[in-house]
Amino acid sequence: MRKLDPRTKLLLLVVINVVMMTGKITGIFVPVRIVFALIPFFLMMRETWFRGSFIYFFLYLYVFLFERFTLQDIHPVLLIILLFTTGLLSRFLAGVMMAYYLMKTTTVSEFVTSMERMHIPKVIVIPFAVMFRFFPTLKEEWQDVKNAMKMRGIGLAGRNPLDVLEYVMVPILMSVSKIADELSAASMTKCLSVDGKRTHIAKVGFSFLDIIMFLCAAAGLFAHIFLGGVIGT
Amino acid sequence: MITFSNINFHYKNNRTDKGNLIDISLTIEDGELIVLTGESGCGKTTFTRLINGLAPNYYPGTVTGELYLDGENIIGKSVAELGRTVGSVFQNPRSQFFNVDTDSELAFAAENIAMDPSEIIRRMDEVTEELDLTELRGCSIFELSGGEKQRIACGSVAVMHPKVIVLDEPSSNLDAESIEKLKCVLAKWKKQGKTIIIAEHRLFFLRELADRLIVMKDGRITNVFERDEMSELSASLKEMGIRPLVEPELIVRRSVEGIRNYIRIEHFKYSYDRKTVALSVDNMSLPGNQVVAIIGNNGAGKSTFLKCLCGIYKTKKDKITLNGSRWKRKLRYRDCYLVFQDVNHQLFTESVLDELIIGMDDSLSEDVKKEKALEILERFGIRDLADHHPMALSGGQKQRVAIASSVAAGRDIILMDEPTSGMDELNMMRLSQELKRLKEAGKTIYVVTHDYEFINECCDSVIRLA
């Protein structure tokens, strides 16, 4: 199975977010939204993440239908809450899933390779590359700290929220800054520097699927800008 | 050949003399395997940092003297430049990977010096074969154990074909099996004629490989032992505060003290995902009011066992009794206290004193709490640290604070996960004394450890998880 090029993924992420967040939800934009909501689903299915894909699919289906067929005879407050959450989900969910897909399926070296193909300077590429590593690390650290708090009986309830924030942030920040420090040292000994040429063993390049995705994104963006998709036009 | 000639190094922004080097002169021949040892803060890490250039380039300080690598003075050369000939493996397996997957990490350094991609791939395959990394290829580093990460770290160094390899406490987070694998890697490198410099506390796995053992103290080289001198060292090493060269035999004592069948486990199961079982214990009893060592091979679920026992991990349908009465997860939370391998994660507050107070019984008044906390700190010999920030302490001190806070919280059962990893002899002995004192105060201590010297020093019984 050919992998999608990181550049295509990045383009899709941007376009999906722009169209879903700032776009209209009626008229010809109904099919546009459907297509864009289906792209992350399709990509996730392709990775055989069935559980995640189906949860996403049905959640989106619910949100999508709810946006169109508003319930009647319902308490106004409840309706506002429902509308608010569905509105939020319909705008953010696809983008979030796309970002998740991007993070999960792109290795750091593929990302760096494709960024360098676009001649983006290393000063920008390297911090982005480090982010790929940063989020999972943060998750690990958070798990540990959460466990430690639980065990020490420092519950979240009944305490000054600022104190709680401090209890969580102090160990995480300490530990993350230590990791960052050691990681920079280790990377330097592996000859990482801002100047100087690199080679790549990662194979990135466009395939047929990239072209289709690219066309989808282009068409969606075209409709969004020129056919009056932006809210308020 | 590496030659240190009257090297002095002083870290900038360092108020103590910890880690500084004073008047180091030493010649290391090609193909030698040198082991540096000594108490924490003796400067052995700094020694390795001068060779790979991290000091003074990344860790700033002032250097005087000369350091020659193959006849060339390397002081002032950049880390990246030195990286072409010097490979580095570090202590913490969690923080030495730039990439998220193992393949990219293996190729990383070679890519950085713009090596031809086909040559990189050829070398990666060669290293995979040599260091037996096949099953680790193409994995996410977040799925690997500490030992596996360390093997990949070695592999990524080997791809560069370095002449010199420096390792800074590479075994400190590893279990027995992984240490054995590390030893094999070192043996292979030695055979290939690489010059290897290792800073370490645990020495037993290096005994057969080391050409010279160098003992450091307060920044100076105090002793240099040749290969044939090492065998007669055991007794004098202990006096120097250094771990033994031979892994001690486990001494099994028949303990009559303590409470028999304190904890009875009939059914105890845990799995991280729905497929693999990480822990499965049927029928086990643990003694109370003792220091109990829990040993077992890699993957026997020792750490998982501790986390389940103290209630962090949710086990379903467990059948555990404490002193004959049902001991549910909620109660286990209240009675147990786990001291993590990485204590950094369990120190939350701004001062050592607060650290103790926060876990105390809420019904006590602030003054009583404070008084009690100071009393406990006194007992642990860290009263003068009461106002210090926990994160500013040394590793051994942090651990003492963590144990002290478990006492402050009134927990009766203290669990510890690999408490002596990366510890020098002095700190290990101190910890043993503390655990014995806790036992006399009526506490029960369960320690997961691989450290036989430590077990012989303070544990009353040993339980093997299989």
Image: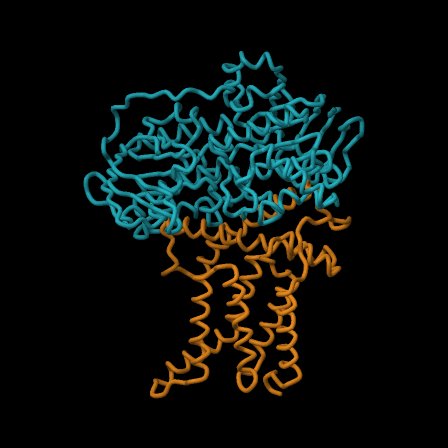
Chain colours: A orange, B cyan
Residue B377: x %, y % from top left: 41, 38
Q: Is residue B228 visible?
A: yes
Q: Quadrant of the N terminus of chain B?
A: top right
Q: Residue at x 58, y 39 (%)?
A: B152
Tell me: B79 left or right of B447.
right
Rendering quarter of residue B70: top right
Tell me: B407 left or right of B110.
left
Residue B13 drawn above or below residue B183: below
Residue B166 drawn above or below residue A55: above
Q: Residue at x 28, y 32 (%)?
A: B289
Residue A52: x %, y % from top left: 45, 63
Residue extending farthest to the left is B324
Rendering quarter of residue A216: bottom right
Q: Nearer the viewer, residue A32 or A86?
A: A32
Q: Is residue B26 visible?
A: no
Residue B207 drawn above or below residue B85: above
Residue extending farthest to the right is B72
Residue B409: x %, y % from top left: 34, 45
Residue B41: x %, y % from top left: 58, 31
Tell me: B258 left or right of B132.
left
Q: Nearer the viewer, residue B81 or A45?
A: A45
Total marks drawn? 0
Q: Quadrant of the C terminus of chain B?
A: top left
